[in-house]
Amino acid sequence: MPLKKISEKELYFMLFRQFSQLVCSRSMFAHHLKLPGRSHFFHLRAFRSSWEGPALWNSSCLSGLPPWPQQFHPSRYLSVNFKPPYHFHHSRWRTAWPNSSFTRFRQAPAIYLSCGHMDRCDNGPPFKRRKSNDETRQHGARGSPSLRSVRPPGSPNDSSQNSPAESETTCVSQTCPHQAKRGAEIQRRWEDFSQHYQQNEGANIFTADGKETKSFDFSVMSYNILSQDLLEDNSHLYRHCSQPILNWNHRFPNILKEFKQHNADILCLQEVQEDHYKKQIKPSLESLGYHCEYKMRTGRKPDGCVIGFKQSKFSLVSCHPVEFYRHGIPLLDRDNVGLVLLLRPAAPGCSAPCLCVANTHLLYNPRRGDIKLTQLAMLLAEISKVSDQEDGSYCPIIFCGDFNSVPGSPLYSFIREGKLEYEGLPIGKISGQEQNPRGQRILSVPIWPKSLGISNYCQYEMSPEAKPVLDEGGISGLCVREEENFTPEKKLQSSIEHKFRLTSVYSHFLTKGGTPEITTCHSRTALTVDYVFYSAAKNDISVQPGSGPIPDGRLQLLARLCLLCEKDLWTINGLPNEHNSSDHLPLLARFRLRC
């Protein structure tokens, strides 16, 4: 009996129908299929009943519309992606099938299952397997910073070969999905240093004339709470999360719970969305006894920075918002902002100086270190103006924020050491996030134009005949303080400096094993970008031996809430998760201000 001849079109639809029936089979979901050709797939979800219905055979394929509409499957985390034949990529869906079309279809697989696990609708997606550092270096994470942590010079385990601690960190990324614990909460402990000061100074502090005086203790939290708009605009960073935990109605109670739990005297928050701040965050913080100051980003960006403080511990002396955008300066066309407050401690019987508190969120772009350095210099100039005292010294400084730079990077070293020789540095290396050296231009000398009104010493400067430049956000170059003994030669040097010897609350490596600490962790990366810097007293526990002369900043670190390594974070499915509703961890420290 002769075989019936069928056309290529009929053969194609027969094969597609067979694939559809296989997908509906429950055994098919036990495997995680990853086939080539992913760049051509489009997302398709369908009910099982729809696969065998007449939808695939209707006339829509002849009317210019795809014959397989998007529908929802009972398992939310199964996505079936179908690659149409070659000629379906044209502007019109063609009914003519050249002889070569079936060959192309046969060579390029047509079905891709993004997840092969069958879950109930109320379950979250399977936990994401993180790439190891070796895999990341070999294949690269497109559009994301490298997972490899950057060690500062002289840090523990600083060598060209992996130490045992580094080997442990590499294993972090290979954590199996079943090791993640649903519903588990992060366990962080306080590391106490107060005993150190009691042993060296006694329980009380004495003035130079031998009279006993009181000290003023307070706590600080720095926290990037993750703007909801930014979360939704960058959903690819949170593919390891189930949708319910990403909703603001779930996230806000968790964030408020952290505020209440830690009960910090000073809050420095980043990525605070304006509508959420006005309607929920500010009223909630005020009910907890905080006074709040807010600076929204420019350029119609929906979020900004907040500094809140307990009114029972401080009173506001002055508030200074800083806008980094400058009209007419191409280098400063970004909408990041900073906020600087001068606070007076409420300490009866203690002649404590005022406290300068600064908060910022620098530009993210890993390849634009020139912009980040300039934004930092602008904020340091404002801090210098605000913290300047009548005797020529500076009041104690707390400097918090998301600096989008890793430990050991040139920008980090500049904050810590007070000086940076930048000539010859590629702009993508400034923050330490960008590992690809190709296509990076070198920093220009000087970095920012003279018209910005900021010297190489990160101070405002204006000649007597210069006039303030009116900007939309206010006046740039306010309250100029000329640095003494400046020479034109010094101003032309390819270096920048600042007068503050700032120390980091965190060492960036865990005490046991030297594993890198992590402050942010999502589907693309896990690293440290958040910091709390402060002007430390000479005998502070964080001051390293041999670090040179250190101005007496009068602040002592009493305790800090320990951070976690990447391995610990992925055991609870990274960030955000059910209990921690930001992709950053809050940084907390307790200080003593010597009166």
Image (cartoon, grey):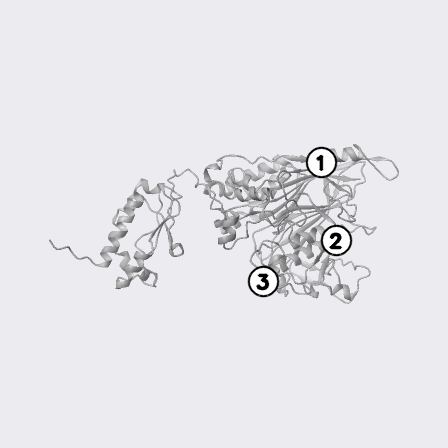
* Relative image position of residue 162 (x, y in whole percent): 58, 46
Q: What is the three-letter code of the residue carrying label 1?
A: Phe
Residue at (74%, 65%) from the top-left corner?
A: 492
Query: Taking the image as drawn, is residue 65 in sight?
Result: no
Residue bearing mark 3: 440
In this view, the residue in front, 55 or 12, is 12
Question: From mark 1 to mark 2, how far is it between C-alphas?
Answer: 29 Å
Residue furthest to the front? 161
User: Regarding mark 1 in the picture, which secondary structure is present there?
Assistant: loop
Query: Taking the image as drawn, is residue 115 in sight?
Result: yes
In this view, the residue in front, 424 or 195, is 424
In this view, the residue in front, 502 or 282, is 502
* Relative image position of residue 409 (x, y in whole percent): 64, 53
* Relative image position of residue 231 (x, y in whole percent): 51, 48
Residue bearing mark 1: 193
Do the residues bearing badges 1 and 3 touch, measured as CB atoms within 8 Å? Answer: no
Closer to the chain start, of discs 1 and 2, is 1
Question: From mark 3 to mark 2, how far is it between C-alphas?
Answer: 32 Å
In this view, the residue in front, 533 or 568, is 568
Q: What is the three-letter code of the residue carrying label 2?
A: Ser
Question: From mark 1 to mark 3, how far is it between C-alphas?
Answer: 43 Å
